[in-house]
Image: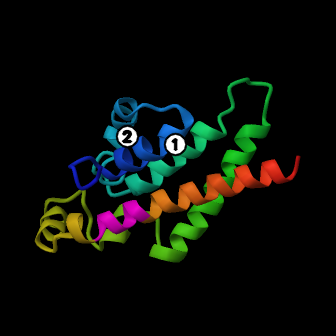
């Protein structure tokens, strides 16, 4: 999806969210504002926020009295973040790209260095693989623990 022109968050959320009932269209809608580290601010990478939302899809707290799913979601977000940082050093868009996407100069440097086609596809791929691995392993743990 990223190579088709969707942003990092849309790509991870729409692709990985299918398993948990999220349509491609809704994933694209939900992820649209997370481009460039949250609305082009260079903050948390969209691929990371997309992965966090997928974790929430699987482990959503839908009853205010039930704290177990959100506890599991928090644990998985922390584990995802640890693994992602081991791969890429940061979860921050401007740190991953080495330039501040929120400034004209930074965006120009990103474009000049072709980072949207060199760096971002790797980050999106890794985020999707990590979240799927985490969610499959928690499913296997839950099945094995029964």
Q: Main secondary structure of the magenta part?
A: helix
Residue 89 location, x and y as percent?
47, 75
What span is colored magenta in the figure?
119-125
Instruction: Tell whether position 96 is magenta.
Output: no
Q: Horizontal and vertical percent for residue 46?
A: 38, 52
Image marks 2 and 1: residues in contact by CB distance under 8 Å: yes
Image x and y of residue 38, in percent: 36, 48
The residue at 41%/55% (across/down) is 47
C-alpha distance separating marks 2 and 1: 9 Å
- Name which residue lies at 39% across and 30% down: 26
Residue at image mark 2: 31
Closest to the observer, 119 or 25: 25
Q: Position of residue 86 (x, y in %)?
A: 54, 76
Q: What secondary structure is found at the residue carrying circle 2? A: helix
Check disc 1: other Cα within 10 Å, few if <14, some if 14-19, many if 20+. many
Among numbered discs 2 and 1, the one appearing first in the sequence: 2
Q: Which of the pair 125/29 is nearer the observer?
A: 125
Task: Look at the numbered disc 1 and give the secondary structure of its residue.
Answer: helix
According to the image, label 1 marks what residue?
53
Q: Compared with residue 72, is residue 104 higher up or lower down, i.e. above or below?
A: below
Q: Is residue 123 left or right of residue 75?
A: left
Residue at the (67%, 46%) spot, across then down: 73
């Amino acid at each position: 999806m990223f190579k088709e022109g969707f942003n990092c968050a849309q790509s991870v959320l729409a692709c990985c969210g299918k398993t948990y009932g999220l349509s491609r269209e809704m994933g694209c809608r939900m992820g649209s504002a997370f481009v460039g580290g949250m609305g082009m601010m260079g903050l948390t990478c969209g691929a990371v926020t997309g992965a966090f939302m997928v974790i929430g899809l699987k482990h959503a707290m839908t009853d205010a009295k039930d704290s177990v799913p959100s506890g599991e979601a928090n644990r998985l977000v922390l584990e995802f973040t640890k693994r992602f940082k081991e791969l890429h050093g940061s979860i921050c868009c401007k740190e991953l790209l080495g330039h501040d996407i929120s400034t004209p100069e930074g965006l120009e440097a990103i474009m000049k260095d072709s980072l949207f086609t060199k760096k971002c596809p790797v980050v999106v791929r890794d985020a999707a693989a990590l979240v799927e691995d985490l969610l499959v392993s928690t499913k296997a743990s839950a099945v094995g623990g029964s």
